Image (spheres, coloured by chain):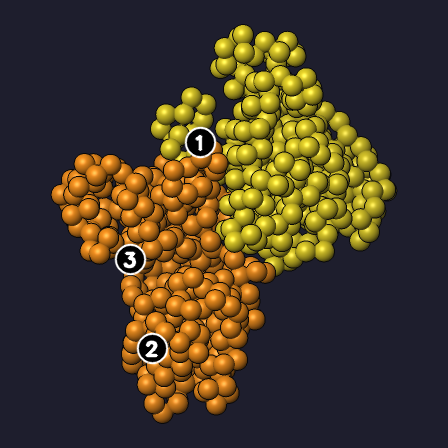
Chain colours: A orange, B yellow
Amino acid sequence: MRTVGIDLGGTKVMAVLVENGEVLAKVKRPTPTVGGPDAVVAAMVAVARKVDPEGSAAGVGIGAPGPVVPGSGVLPAAPNLPGWDHDVDVVGRVSAALEGRPVKLDNDVNVGTLAEWKLGAGRGVDDLLGVFAGTGVGAGLVLDGRLRQGPRGLAGEIGHTFVAFDQFHDAPVGRGELEDYTGRRSLQRWVDVSPPAESAFMRSLMHKGRLKSKVWAEGVEAEDPLTMRLVSRAASALSAAIASAITLIDVERVVLGGGFAERLGEPFRQRVDAEVAARAFAGQTAPVVAARLGDTGGALGAALLLEHT
Amino acid sequence: MRTVGIDLGGTKVMAVLVENGEVLAKVKRPTPTVGGPDAVVAAMVAVARKVDPEGSAAGVGIGAPGPVVPGSGVLPAAPNLPGWDHDVDVVGRVSAALEGRPVKLDNDVNVGTLAEWKLGAGRGVDDLLGVFAGTGVGAGLVLDGRLRQGPRGLAGEIGHTFVAFDQFHDAPVGRGELEDYTGRRSLQRWVDVSPPAESAFMRSLMHKGRLKSKVWAEGVEAEDPLTMRLVSRAASALSAAIASAITLIDVERVVLGGGFAERLGEPFRQRVDAEVAARAFAGQTAPVVAARLGDTGGALGAALLLEHT
């Protein structure tokens, strides 16, 4: 089956044409910053046409940043998409613009997990947790050989795991959730609230007041004390949330990806894997392996939605 | 279908004869403290015969304290059962003793959740979390209308959620897991390590150095400061773990039971329900309702195993 997959992100829209797990063509363009949902829908239609000019695909799958109620086709207000401030019937609109072609929509992290499960580091198991640490932290679940979406499309929101329950009422940064300690956004905040002397190194790497994921690897490399402390805590909080998830839902393998984790690379993955094993209940861990599909995983997984949901 | 359900606990073995969700007969006896698995298996066979003397049941379900690999019929070493220090083929042995009758085995908390889902406070939803706080804290999951067991039978071990990730290496009591803050065993430990002056009230309620679940309700009633602090923290840690679970797996309802929670009663449940709602991601909570089946829930759920797994 030949299908188109679209990864709708806050900064770019990527489309791939896929057959038997092979990427036949790929296009991307910036996400429109003006024009709201109309412009974003038009951009998705445009990349779908461009990647498959002959219209040979049996359908189009879309991964988008937000919870999607299964079967609804609707993407609710999405803070990461410019001007996307209300429910939009994405499936209906994209399908109508593409001559009624079948269209499916799911959360971006769910489709990333689907891709790793079918084509990447998660192959061969029926129970998988896919964790993606980028700006924030999200996860996707495969349970008993099926992608778990949940009745409200919430399943996998591991970033909101409470890893420090007693910080709920008085945390300096956040409420004690995993995303308060792990991911690009939270580490940036901790630098912002730290004394200038302590954070001089990281502040020197800011570009327009922002720290990209790659600077954290540089800070570790340079043995900057603040960076090492924050990255160490990020790994520890992530390990706690992953170990808790393994124990609650019983998965056989964990795939770790996302820009933040991938920039920190193999040392970070190894540290998380070892700490997850140390925390595992009754010694029953699940190995934490590196995601394999990188930047294209989301679009690939979206292309798989037609066959696997 | 008429079936026998057996709840195998550390102190008693209870059997019920069930038809159409109605308990037709009930028997219990103490769990043998000597004789190990042979004596315990014999006790299960004896209660099964006594509750159904005519042998009218189509089969026997058993709920037991420990992870059970789905379909294995084996209960591994179980610290809560006297002398149960190795794998025992419970299904094979009980079935052989009962003339080859069909026998099914699952974890006690899973069967308690199954009972609440089919006959109690969890009726009518397809996605349910059953949480039982007693000596420790365990949970059962119903996802997409099926009891989730997990490939290793681990699913639902919510007591090992890391709610205080930074306590892993230096906690005075435990590693920062939910069970270090919630449940009869952990609260007992916190009293044991607290200064005598502070814990004078609770120590006065000890019987042979042990605190039963009911004394916690007494301590709250008497407004004992240590009790109130420990119970408040127990509720908060439990709320954090439940809110994290709702967000990770997306369930519609939570049933709260178990001796510790039930003794603390409605005020405790209300507090947990309110804090779970306050912690919920994007306001999407799931109501925390009281378990309805009490002490008989485990045996009832075991009786349902024949039909529902």
Q: What amino acid type is highlighted by mark number 3? A: Gly
Residue that numbered label 2 is attached to: A16
Give percent across and percent down for residue A66: 46, 63
Give percent across and percent down for residue B282: 52, 53
- The relative height of residue B13 versus residue B1 in the rendered view (above or below) is above
**For the residues marked 2 and 3, what is the alpha-carbon distance in whole angstroms?**
20 Å
**For the residues marked 2 and 1, what is the alpha-carbon distance in whole angstroms?**
44 Å
**For the residues marked 1 and 3, what is the alpha-carbon distance in whole angstroms?**
29 Å
Q: Does residue B85 appear in this view?
A: no
Q: Which element is circle 2 on?
A: strand
Residue that numbered label 1 is attached to: B176
Number of other residues with Cα within 10 Å of mark 1, as a class: few under 14, some 14 to 19, many 20 or more = many
Q: Is residue A287 left or right of residue B49?
A: left
Q: Which corner quadrant of the image does residue B38 belong to?
A: top right
> Which image quadrant: the N terminus of chain A?
bottom left
Q: Nearer the viewer, residue A20 or A45?
A: A45
